[in-house]
């Protein structure tokens, strides 16, 4: 049995070695088919890529600044308009509350004055009755 196991493992090892050898042979054959650029083409392509990357970076930078500026001033203007609206509403609410308080105070004073007038009239009536 041990001989059969050795034969099986030897066969598997041989297949792996053949697969590795055939892989590297195929790789070498494919690399021979590749058309490599000349140094001049390599420099031209490299310059083209770097130029496109720089142009794209500049465009993104400018757009970023523009949106940042618009966002900053746009949000500030929106905040100011909201705050002024709220201030106006608060002022009108305060004015209404003040008017209501003044009116209730005036009503209270009138009620107090009427009560005082009534009391005074009653006292005067009592005094006049006692004098008679």
Image (cartoon, rainbow, N blue to C red):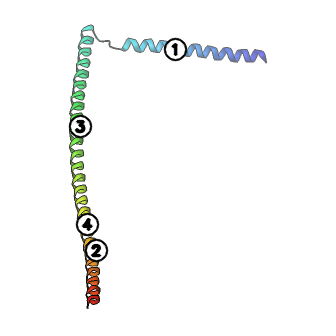
Q: Quadrant of the C terminus?
A: bottom left
Is the residue under label 3 in contact with that under label 1 (CB below 8 Å)?
A: no
Which disc is residue 72 wearing? 3
CA gap between label 2 and label 4 equals 18 Å
Q: Position of residue 26 (x, y in %)?
A: 46, 15
Is the residue under label 4 in contact with that under label 2 (CB below 8 Å)?
A: no
CA gap between label 1 and label 4 equals 99 Å
Q: Quadrant of the N terminus?
A: top right
Which disc is residue 100 wearing? 4
Q: Position of residue 123 (x, y in %)?
A: 29, 82
- 1 or 3: tag closer to the N-terminus: 1
Is the residue under label 4 in contact with that under label 1 (CB below 8 Å)?
A: no
For mark 2, what is the residue? Answer: 112
At 22% across and 25% down in the image, what residue appears?
Answer: 58
Quadrant assignment, res 55: top left
The answer to whether residue 4 is left or right of residue 64 is right
């Amino acid at each position: 049995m041990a001989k059969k196991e050795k034969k099986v493992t030897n066969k598997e090892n041989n297949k792996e070695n053949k697969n590795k050898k055939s892989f590297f042979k195929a790789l070498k054959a494919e690399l021979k088919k590749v058309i490599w650029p000349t140094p001049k083409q390599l420099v031209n392509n490299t310059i083209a890529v770097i130029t496109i990357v720089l142009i794209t970076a500049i465009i993104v930078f400018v757009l970023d600044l523009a949106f940042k500026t618009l966002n900053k001033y746009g949000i500030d203007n929106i905040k100011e308009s909201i705050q002024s609206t709220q201030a106006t509403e608060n002022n009108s609410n305060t004015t209404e509350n003040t008017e209501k308080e003044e009116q209730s105070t005036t009503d209270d004073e009138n009620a107090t004055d009427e009560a005082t007038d009534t009391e005074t009239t009653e006292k005067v009536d009592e005094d006049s009755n006692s004098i008679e």
